Image (cartoon, rainbow, N blue to C red):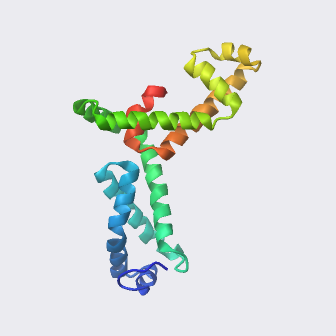
Amino acid sequence: MDSMPAGEGVLLRMIDGDESAFTSVYRHYHPALYIYLLRICKIPSLAEDLVHDVFLKIWEIRGRINPALPFTGYLYRIARNHAFKTLQKLAHDEALQEQLLLHQQTQGRGPEQIIWEKEYDRLFHEALGRLTPQRLNVFRLCRQEGKSYDEAAALLGISRSAVKKHMVLSMRFIHNYIYRHAPVIMVILLAKKFF
């Protein structure tokens, strides 16, 4: 069990439903968890919301917490999973995208934007390097060289449906790889650059 200022019994009391013990756990872990989530999402208000969501979930599932296992690892795993799910939902929220794009336009193309573009480019090429050779060939022909599915199929000696399948799987893999490794703002602002 993780060491806490009030002792090991705090976690056990929280698991049993003691609200004051829950408050102690919250106060103990909140600062570090907030910083952790802020590194993922880069939006202070969102990081704070995520922290509250994670602790609400901890309270709801407190009966399933195994006090013999490290609580910190459990807490951070829940936080990471919740953050990624939330960021994926937000990335598809058109109103949020418009708000972020408007904010970015008013800020101009500053050093942070240039860093994000370089990071996105790095992640994009890293993802390409992880594609199978056939998918990489299909992706390069169709997406980077502008060939139609029929032209790519003829060049590679495979069916048009195979080309389409490779493109769908390649795009999905690249999309998921970037979402797993990049902050949401960077993904939203730069996704249209490559897709």
Is 161 displayed left or right of 185 in the figure?
Answer: right
Provide residue 65's location: percent of width, then percent of height. 52, 74
Is 8 displayed left or right of 101 in the figure?
Answer: right
Provide residue 40's location: percent of width, then percent of height. 41, 51
Q: How many marks?
A: 0
Rendered image quadrant of residue 117: top left
Is 20 displayed left or right of 85 in the figure?
Answer: left
Identify which residue, 174 or 48, lies in the foreground. 174
**Residue at the spot 44% in from the left edge and 69% down from the top edge:** 58
**Residue at the spot 34% in from the left edge and 78% down from the top edge:** 24
> Farthest residue toward the right?
157
Query: Is 50 placed above or below 131 here?
Result: below
Provide residue 137's location: percent of width, then percent of height. 66, 25
One can see residue 93 in this view: no
Query: Is 95 placed above or below 142 here?
Result: below
Provide residue 105's location: percent of width, then percent of height. 26, 30
Query: Is 194 placed above or below 178 here?
Result: above
One can see residue 146 in this view: yes
Is 5 displayed left or right of 12 in the figure?
Answer: left
**Residue at the spot 46% in from the left edge and 56% down from the top edge:** 82
**Residue at the spot 59% in from the left edge and 33% down from the top edge:** 128
Identify which residue, 41 or 125, lies in the foreground. 125
Rendered image quadrant of residue 104: top left
